[in-house]
Image (spheres, grey):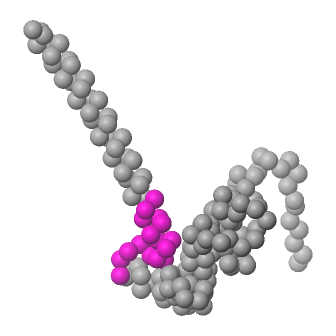
Amino acid sequence: MVPQEDLIRRRLRRMKELHALYKDQYWRLLEDLRRRHYRYTLRNGHGGRKDEAAAAAQERDRAGLPLTCACAGCEAKPMPLSHHCFTHILLDPQQVLYMKNKDSDPAGDGGAIEDEEDAFPVLCTEDLPLPLDLTDGLNPDPPTLTTTL
């Protein structure tokens, strides 16, 4: 027989463990939801509400961007500030944010990929310039700006 005080302590400890597990699960699910919503927004150009979709379509129309992907036969919505959808973003000659997945290009020569499903674009972060506030301490002699009046 377990004394009542030990029983209460054991139940309290288990409740705290269970609470911690539920809390961790909640934050994992919330992060997964944020990731899925971000992906949805990239694919569809809006957050899912009709007014956001209409506003996004008007904004794209004002900017002169198409409402569908520029690839023939593709009806997907283009990525923000682009003419191509996420699947075909590698075909845009002006984009610099994405590159071919190295795993999908076995030859490594940048040639054509046989299976289009393997041509999943990857965000390349190595060549992106750092924001100015992050580079202040990196360059001891920053360039000086001169203005002429």
Magenta residue span? 35-50
- Left or right, 108 with respect to 113, comes to right
- Left or right, 21 with respect to 109, comes to left
Residue at image coords 47%, 65%: 38
Q: Is residue 125 visible?
A: yes
Q: Quadrant of the C terminus?
A: bottom right
Q: Given the current orientation, which residue lies at the most extreme front position?
A: 114
Q: Relative to 142, say whether 95 is above or below.
A: below
SS majority, magenta: helix
Q: Nearer the viewer, residue 24 or 71?
A: 71
Q: Nearer the viewer, residue 103 or 76?
A: 103
77 magenta-colored: no
Residue at image coords 49%, 74%: 43
Residue at image coords 44%, 69%: 40
Q: Relative to 137, say whether 82 is above or below.
A: below
Q: Nearer the viewer, residue 85 or 65?
A: 85
On the image, the x and y values in percent for residue 97 come to 67, 67
Quadrant of the rendered image containing residue 18: top left
- Left or right, 47 with respect to 119, comes to left
On the image, the x and y values in percent for residue 134 come to 70, 51
Residue at image coords 59%, 89%: 72
Q: Relative to 3, say whether 50 is above or below.
A: below
42 magenta-colored: yes
On the image, the x and y values in percent for residue 30 come to 37, 53
Quadrant of the rendered image containing residue 1: top left
Count of marks placed on residues:
0
Quadrant of the rendered image containing residue 33: bottom left
Q: Relative to 8, say whether 110 is above or below.
A: below
Q: Is residue 97 visible?
A: no
